Image (cartoon, rainbow, N blue to C red):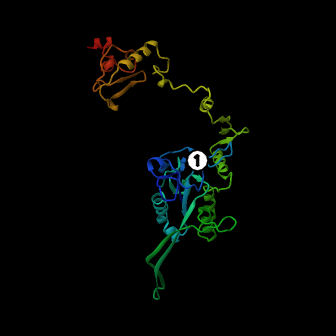
Amino acid sequence: NAAFCCWSQDRQARDNNGNCNTPYDSQCIDKDPGDNANFCYADHSRSSPATHVAGGFSIFGDIQNGEENIEGSIHCHGFAWGDDARDSSSIYKGNNLFFISMYDHMYTRGYVRNAPGSAMCGCAENMAVVTRADCTEIESEEEFKLSYDAGTSVFSVELLRIVDVDFNACNGVDADGNDDNNDLESYYRRLVEEGRASQSNFEKLQKILVGTDAGKCNAAIVEFMEEQGIVQSSTSAATATKGDSKEVKVIDPAYENASEGGDGDMPDAPAEFVKGEFETEEASPEAESGLDELDEDLKVESTTDAENLIMPGDGARSINNDTSTVSEGKCKAYCDRDATTTWEEKCNWVRCKGCDQCDDLN
């Protein structure tokens, strides 16, 4: 029974919110919203309908060095409602969502952009795990007509009109029972104390709004990673475990030095991306020579549609002769090497027309 939004960028100047300024083309590029929370982690599977990312996760803490708030400035704001559908907080939750997301933050403050892997706004269980969120509650004034039919003993209530709806900072209570306003967790605690929301749902919310005390964000990250089978070893290096399998370092050793500007060797590129290696075995000198010639004297005089570029097989690459204006030349080595295509088809390729096999067919 809670929802919130989180934004990572400010794009509007002169509103006393965030650090976007004028002129926009130089002072409002990748600017920050007013910082009121920290991202801990985002489980991409929670927001897949919104982000179109089916799985994976993003981590926003440095566990090894004990650092949090490494993502920079973000701003989170939400609301909650009671279990009873007739509770005003539930009746007007759609109005509250529009006010918070569209009016108060995008229109008034210019806050935009979501966290990687998380929706910008959503039910709490679908959002990134964060430390806290601001909170807005509804205060409504309504006029009702009460009727009682003595003959049928029926008592009825009719809503005549909505006099006023106000959007106010939430009044909540902290864990010690003290007033704590404008805080989503504290407001939900108040709903529980008033019997308007359940304790079990409150405890679920506390897994998503983990608190602002130092270390709580990273503790949530460690717990989440353990659920994914990734734990810390005795040397504090992140490791992945599954059943009785051996621990595997998350960092690929082949990249470790290179990523730090060292002399580490990078992994070899897949064979299909290496010049002259279109098959699993090493390319022959004849094939490499043919490809060098192809690179030098293929000159496309007009743009060829992607649909006209064909891959006849793993052992060749060519250009369809129907629309290409590539100049003709002698038989290329790959024409002979390609065993997946018939000569009747290959003789339609511009660079194979000079082959003896095509002369025989003609």
Q: Is residue 312 left or right of residue 152?
A: left
Q: Quadrant of residue 182?
A: bottom right
Residue 290: % across, % down: 40, 15
Residue situated in front as seen by the camera: 196 or 42: 42
Residue situated in front as seen by the camera: 101 or 270: 101
The outermost residue toward the bottom is 150
Residue 294: % across, % down: 38, 18
The quarter in which the C terminus is drawn is top left
Q: Secondary structure at mark 1?
A: loop
Residue 216: % across, % down: 67, 52
The quarter in which the N terminus is drawn is bottom right
Q: Residue placed at 27% from the left, 25% from the top?
A: 322
Residue 52: % across, % down: 47, 46
Q: Name the residue that disc number 1 marks.
A: 71
Crowding at dot 1, Cα within 10 Å, few <14 / some 14-19 / many 20+, comes out as some
Residue situated in front as seen by the camera: 203 or 137: 137
Q: Quadrant of residue 145?
A: bottom left
The outermost residue toward the front is 23
Q: Residue placed at 68% from the left, 35% from the top?
A: 247
Number of callouts: 1
Residue situated in front as seen by the camera: 350 or 102: 102
Residue 80, compared with residue 320, is above or below; it is below
Residue 251, compared with residue 333, is above or below; it is below
What amino acid does circle 1 point to? Glu
The outermost residue toward the right is 234
